Every structure is written in structure tokens, then in C-alpha cells.
Image: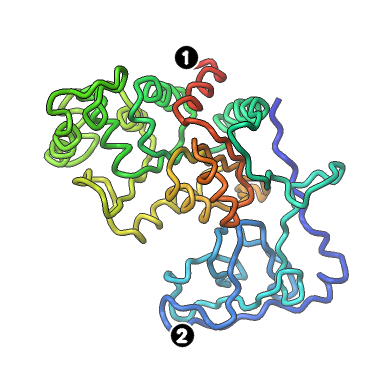
Amino acid sequence: MFHLPEYREPDFTEEKFTKAPDAMWEKVTVKGTAPENFHSTSMFPEYFKIDGKWTLAKESRMDSSVVICDGGELKVVENRNLEIGDKVILGRTENAEEGIYLHSTGFEDPEEAGGDQFVFRQGRSRETSYARDYDRLFELLKYEKEHGSILWVMGPAFSFDADARRAMQAMVENGYVDGLMAGNALATHDLEGAMFHTALGQDIYTQKSQPNGHYHHLDVINRVRKSGSIAKFIDDYQISDGIMYSCVKNQVPFVLTGSIRDDGPLPEVIGNAYDGQTAMRGMVKKATTVICLATMLHTIATGNMTPSYRVLEDGTVRPVFLYTVDADEFVVNKLLDRGSLAATTIVTNVQDFIMIVVKGLGLM
């Protein structure tokens, strides 16, 4: 049976905590600009001494400022979103000297030796054995289906394969998807697969190019824009399969963010990068497991805004599990290089990955 790792908070009776000063702060004077010497957050739990009491910042992300709100509550805010008058915590040390403490070992089992993180830190390769990782993932997904929130971050590779589309649809329909983040391409080619059985004009099973197939995704975009939304398009054209179809029909929320290379795009695609980041973070805040698949930039963006922990309504602190899956070793290790250390990496074709997962869960 799956069990969440137990969180152990710091022992605040230790001398370094009792003798530590309150964290210093300074008010914002220019909108969207932090004071000099602002403290920048990490993905780990961080405590700040406010009025003599050590307080955990409940919702964090990398590279943001910490604002002291009324009543001493702490809010982690991207610097661009700081408002004049916000009280921003100052300090560049993290071992209590300035009333700031970064707690990276809270989920460690003290009986287990070795390592100073509870998560995997090493880069891995195509030759690594992933059998144990898959077994753990199956148990994790079963647990999260009942107790957590599973967020999927997907590249367009899923939409290029008939079996992968069907497998992901089964995941949605069986309650293993609580949110989806992707770009214009995943949604476009998934809907193209539903309407024409092609992706970029190639049959998604035989891979044979179809006559005038290069128009298919453009026709789909045009028709979705004519309908006004993906949901209306699905009704207008009686779409009956695929990832976007299953999300719409099962009321699974999705965030689609755009890029400079997009065709169209689809109506729901957020074109402003910072609006898209805000929408993504809103979805990440609800997630307890995040699985990133074959999309390097979305994976890095998601990793940067995903903390290693979540504070539940009852005050319990639990881990957030982050998986990154890609056929390219560089991509999965890139996330680790950027400091998102609480990630389990799997190097494989994501179409093969999702088939293993659905079969491991007994869905196909």
C-alpha cells in the first residue's frame, strides 16, 4: 500500500531558532519591483520568524518574494505582481541567521542513510531500470485519485499516436486526471485526430500521409474558431474521442498557453506569456502530483512554479510529486539542472510510457 512520507518540521527549540532575530522587511515603493536585498524563494519549505514565531510560507514557488500580510500570514508573490506598500522580507541567508530558514530535509526518513534530499538527484539514462519507478507511480496514482490532485503537462507527441490518445482518454475517464496543461499543438492535433484520424496530415495509426493532409490541422483550427470554443466545436461536429473530448465531457480543467510559432491559435489558447504563467500557477497550486511529458519548455516552466510540498486544509504538510518523462536525456536532466530537485525522471518515449501506465492501472 502507498503511504505518504511523513513531514518533520524543524525543532524550533534549538538555540539557533530561539536566538534568531525576526525577519527584516521593507515596503515596496515601485509597483512590480522588490526592495534591494529581497529574499527569493526556493521549491522547499521555508520558515520566517515573524513577531517571535516561526511561520511556514504555505504556497511557494521558485524565484519569488515573500510578502507579510495582515495577521502575519505569508504570501509568495512573483516580483512583477508586487504592489506598492507590500511588506517584502529581506535576507540572503537561509539557516536562521536573518530569521529565515530553508527546510530541505523535512520528508527524509532519519533511519535511511545517505543523501541530503528525500528525492532523486541524479540524472538518469535510457539504460536505467524504471520498473520500480513504474510500480511506485501506479500506487501513487491510485492514492492520488482518492486523496490528491493529479496534473498532467503534455506535449503534442500524444496526439500523434492512436493508442496514446486512447490511453490518455482512459486516464481521464477513470479519474486519474484532475487538470491538463499544454500548448496549442497538443489540443489542435488531438482534435485533428478526432476529426480526420490524422496528425499533421498523417494517419495516427498507419502514419501514411493523406491527400491534402497538411490542411487538416488548419481546417480544425478554423472550425474551432468558428464555433467559438473547443467545447462548442465538439458539439457542433459530434466529436467523440480524444484527450480534449474527454476533458470537456468530464469537466477536467485545462490551460493552453501559446507560443510565437502557433497556427491560429485555438480560442482558449492564452497568447500573453505572463497571463499564461498566472493561469498555469493557479492550476499548479491545486496539484499534489505533476507529470510532465515530452515538452521541455512547459516542463521547465511547471517545475519552476511547483513547490516540493503542499499544506493541506488541516495544516498537514505533504510532498508534491513531480515526474518528468521524455525520450531525450537532456530534457529530463535540464529540469534538475535548473534546481527542481524533487523530480523523478524517466527517459522513454511518452507514448510507450502512457501505455505502460494504463495497463499497470488495469484500464486497458
Task: Give the left or right position of residue 268, taking residue 103 as reference.
Answer: left
Front in this rendered view, residue 175 or 291? 291
Characterize the local packing of mark 2: few (<14), some (14-19) or many (20 or more) Cα atoms within 10 angstroms: some
Q: Gap in Å between the C-alphas at discs 1 and 2?
A: 58 Å
Rendered view: 23 above or below 232? below
Residue drawn at x 47%, y 31% is 350
Q: Could you tell me which quadrant the N terminus lies in?
A: top right
How far from the left and from the top, in percent, is residue 132?
Answer: 68, 27
How far from the left and from the top, in percent, is residue 114?
Answer: 82, 46
Task: Give the left or right position of residue 64, taking residue 113 as reference.
Answer: left
Front in this rendered view, residue 227 or 344? 344
Q: First in sequence, mark 1 or 2: give its number.
A: 2
Which quadrant of the view contains residue 329?
Answer: top right
Residue drawn at x 38%, y 21% is 166
Residue drawn at x 25%, y 21% is 208
- Name the mark on residue 10: none
Residue drawn at x 64%, y 32% is 128
How far from the left and from the top, in percent, is residue 115?
Answer: 78, 48
The kind of residue tagged 2 is: Thr
Colouring scheme, one of rainbow, by chain, secondary structure, one colour: rainbow
SS for dot 1: loop
Q: Which residue is disc 2 drawn over? A: 29
Front in this rendered view, residue 192 or 207? 207
Rendered view: 274 above or below 5? below
SS for dot 2: loop
Task: Give the left or right position of residue 66, taking residue 248 as reference.
Answer: right
Q: Which residue is disc 1 drawn over? A: 364
The kind of residue tagged 1 is: Met
How far from the left and from the top, in percent, is residue 32?
Answer: 42, 75
Rendered view: 217 above or below 70? above
Mark 1–mark 2 CB contact (< 8 Å): no
